[in-house]
Amino acid sequence: MCGIIGYSGPLEARKILLDGLSQLEYRGYDSAGIAFFDTGSEVHLIKRTGKVAMLREACASMKVSSHCGIGHTRWATHGGVSDANAHPHRAGRVTLIHNGIIENYHSLTKEFNLDERLVSQTDSEVAAWVLDHFYSGDPKAAIKSLVERVEGSYGFCIMFDDRPGEIYGVRSVSPLVAAYTRSGALIASDLTALIPYTRKYFVVPENHIVKLTGYKISLYDLEGAVVSPEIMEVNWNMDSAMKNGFPHFMLKEIHEQPEALKNTIVPRIAKGLPDFADDKIPDHLFAQCSKIHMIACGTAMHAGMVAKALMEPVLRIPVIVSIASEFRYGEPLIDEETLVIIISQSGETIDTLAALRLAKSYGSKTLAIVNVKGSTIARESDFVLYTHAGPEIAVASTKAYSVQLAALYMIICRMALVRGKFTREQAASFIMELLDAIPAMESMISRKEEEKNLVTHLIQQHDTFFMGRGLDYAFSLEGALKLKEISYIHAEAYAAGELKHGTIALIAPEVPVIAIATQEPVFSKMISNVREVKARGAFVILLTKEHAQVDEALADVHIRIPDMDDRFTVFPIAVILQLIAYYASIGKNLDVDQPRNLAKSVTVE
Ligand code: F6R
């Protein structure tokens, strides 16, 4: 949450900052601002509520040139959305931007007598004043004192009035990455802002100070000793962070799923079997555990729900899925024999990170499924399985979900093999079926008009219900979340048999029910549930396999996916559910990629 960019180098800083903020806008988009040194070393500050486009417009008439500056796009935590609360904040000789939450801002305000000075309601401005208090010409010493006093999470980028051309960064929990490139030195809250300039970067270690100048980047520990950064390389390219002719990132990312799946699965197949040798994940991790605990938030948690429904019948060990924000404050029943699987696209979600740390403190082995290379969760887990989705820019997750599923399916297969639950032939055929899910997804993407047509009814309604049994229920959870977050239509997912224990009272004429019926063993039960809602006038959107025998009068809209093994239907079904949400959002003329109140990568509690 909150996008951060800093630049020092030969190019025009204002342009780099504004372009960077556009790349980072998915991290927060209620206000934005930049501050920069002009060529006479004077600091200029400009900030606006609204999207980065508003800030760009406000900057258009500025004639001053600059080669060093910082920029911020905000997702409000402390204080409402206003120009004053937008970043950067000025405090004496300090100009500062912040991502995170300073928990002790109130006591700091009292201790440093800041009440009279504050012009915003933000915790960030308090930090800026505390830093100014400690600053007497030595930036690193002042930052060290600040770090010793603030509690909470932060990624700060800082300029000092008397140090033109220099930017300082420090972080705790909240992410910061930096790179020295042919275009100059850059720092950002995440990689997407760096890929136009470089693929090589380093993660700023926690409690280290990074200093950017036009000709180099230096890293120090808090005592001021020079530290060598660990340089990493990402294989994302510029194209992956552009819309490339699609009207929205979300639609582009839906289309990218087949490719992302191939990139995640194929390099991990050896002799037809799943193989994690290159990921350095040993078989004993899978062989020795007595139970599995998956932890994640939102869509990533829903991927875990699908995996659980598949794992327990195959592995015959308990599999639990926890919401990270609940798990982290609980007293979980995990131990050294528990394999904890952490799922996170960004690798920075604060609750998921805290859950990981808690799991490690119980002695559990941790395996993370992460998309962003070098992210905190990836670095802190015992083992990592990277998904290869490329950058996901739309706030609503699509391709990250599919590749998380692909990674989990590979894990299930390898575990079943290692634990003697699958023969080599069974494992090889499981992998073949997984690969066959890719053309099934492609075929659903090519038929996207079906979803486009059906939303006409959906967008006139206030509520929508999703239902399914077994795996289909796990898919429904994600369908409901997707619809809610980008179309603002209230949606709920139910295990179909549960509906009549209360919720069926809400089924009135025309209420949409999206019924997923792809699981053979419970197919007839599902159809009975569809009859029950149809009898109460529901508008039924039925999703089945191609050759399912259904009385067509039951469904107002019937979408058929290719015939396939029950275990893999999630892949084409996910595409349908994503497209329903996408077209509902378009139909309501909403901001698909940046829905209200949300931001990608939830780095605050
Ligand atoms: C919904 C969505 C969120 C994320 C959740 C976890 O479309 O994107 O629910 O799935 O915030 O984020 P990560 O996977 O980055 O930990």
Image (cartoon, helix red, strand yellow):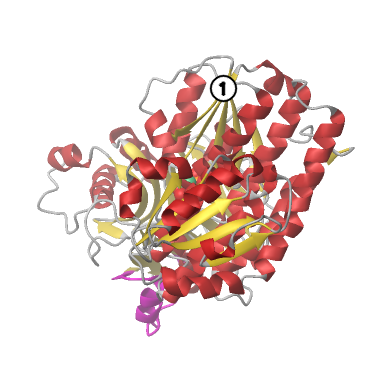
Quarter of the image for residue 146 reads: top left
Q: Is residue 347 visible?
A: no
How many numbered marks are there? 1
Q: Is residue 556 visible?
A: yes
Residue 321 belongs to the span the image colors magenta: no
- Residue at figure coordinates x 69%, y 34% from the top left: 411
Q: Nearer the viewer, residue 159 or 204?
A: 204
- Residue at figure coordinates x 35%, y 49% from the top left: 504
Looking at the picture, which amino acid does disc 1 mark?
Pro
As drawn, 440 above or below 313:
below
Which quadrant, please, contains the C terminus? Answer: top left
As drawn, 278 above or below 257:
above
Residue 56, x across and y down, in percent: 41, 77
Range shown magenta: 45-68
| Label 1 crowd bin: few (<14), some (14–19), many (20+), radius 10 Å | some
* Most distant residue in the left direction: 116
- Residue at figure coordinates x 44%, y 52% from the top left: 532
